[in-house]
Amino acid sequence: MSAAAPAFLEVSDLRIGFPGRAGDVPVVHGVDFALSAGETLALVGESGSGKSLTALSLIDLLPGGARRLGGRIRIGENQLDTLSSNAIRKIRGGEIAMIFQDPLSALNPAFTVGRQLTDAIRSHHPLSRGAAAKRAEELLDLVGIPSPKARLHSFPHEMSGGQRQRVAIALALASGPKLLIADEPTTALDVTVQAQIMALLARLRQELGLAILLISHNLDLVAEICHRVAVMYAGRIVETNTVEEIFRRPQHPYTRMLLDCIPRLDDRPGPLATIPGEPPLFGKLPSGCPFRPRCPAAHERCLAMPPAFPQEAGQAACWLAA
Ligand SMILES: Nc1ncnc2c1ncn2[C@@H]1O[C@H](COP(=O)(O)OP(=O)(O)OP(=O)(O)O)[C@@H](O)[C@H]1O
Ligand code: SF4
Ligand SMILES: [Mg+2]
């Protein structure tokens, strides 16, 4: 990866909310990040921090009621926030693909893997059925499915969870996307298969020059394949840095506490560390720093919101790091 490569995806001041009785209730509050071709950025944070909403807004697939309240999203040459839903749908089908925790959500149980792949390929490329079947076989091979020609005739239920996720990835690659968004793609799989799918994503990034936005709870797992990490808390990115620096010198108390929760082989037996308290409830942020009620380092100054931080290495949304 070249550090100077221009960003393929640029998100600035992204705000997302749900309608409330007294107007929109913001849940994502001004998210900024950038992602270059051939780079993997991990978006990590506890449940409810806004990771999926951030990702879904990039493909204009926010869940019912949610809407983008502001901000700019540039993908390649396209400024998404200025385009119609129809125009965004075309970009979504071509340049951007997404995979989810449950591969079955992307696969149709009634059709063979080959049929689904050839249909997807032909919807993007003007190929005969035979040429599309050949391409489908190549895609299955690319994602590491053994005997790909024979597996074209399998139905999703005839495959293991890990194989189904590989097929869902092959399906996502059918259009030849430049950006792959993976929302918790391994959470439903056992530990060995999780590592295999992560290794596959790393290989695809390298071989195809994909930009990958990887959403995960699991900092340990993302460390294996990501270049940079953005840590989200209560709808904000509170720290961004290279994966090495996040592990070596975390700046934000929340990042430090997330890292402390990773089980380590050399740990003495005992209960696993957890972050005390709960993230703020939907639409109910505390005054000042949103992490204040759970932060062991909170002090008087934290009653005011820490200043927004530039998206540069080694900065964090915390008075102590400012
Ligand atoms: N359909 C919805 N209706 C109302 N609120 C929602 C809906 N989807 C998400 N939210 C709220 O938006 C916030 C962010 O949700 P989001 O799904 O982005 O979190 P997440 O970080 O992806 O969590 P998880 O790790 O559990 O997937 C949460 O507080 C959640 O309560
Ligand atoms: S600003 Fe204060 S409360 Fe917030 S994370 Fe930093 S020290 Fe903790
Ligand atoms: Mg989510």
Image (cartoon, rainbow, N blue to C red):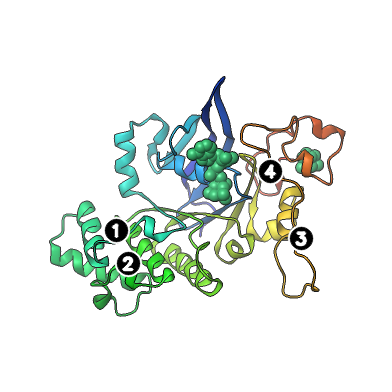
Question: How far apart are the alpha carbons under marks 3 and 4?
Answer: 16 Å
Q: Label 1 sits on what residue type?
A: Asn
Which residue is under mark 2? 156
Position of 249 relative to 252 (above/below): below
Q: Label 2 sits on what residue type?
A: Pro
Q: Pointers 2 and 4 in contact (CB under 8 A)? A: no
Q: Within 10 angstroms of label 1, few (less than 14), some, or many (20 or more) residues?
A: some
Which residue is under mark 4? 279
Task: Residue 240: give x, y in percent of width and height.
Answer: 64, 48
The first of marks 3 and 1 along the sequence is 1
The total number of labels drawn is 4
Which residue is under mark 3? 273
Q: Label 3 sits on what residue type?
A: Ala
User: Is residue 321 shown to the viewer in this render?
Assistant: no
Q: Secondary structure at mark 3?
A: loop
Q: Pointers 1 and 2 in contact (CB under 8 A)? A: yes
Task: Residue 157: give x, y in percent of width and height.
Answer: 33, 68
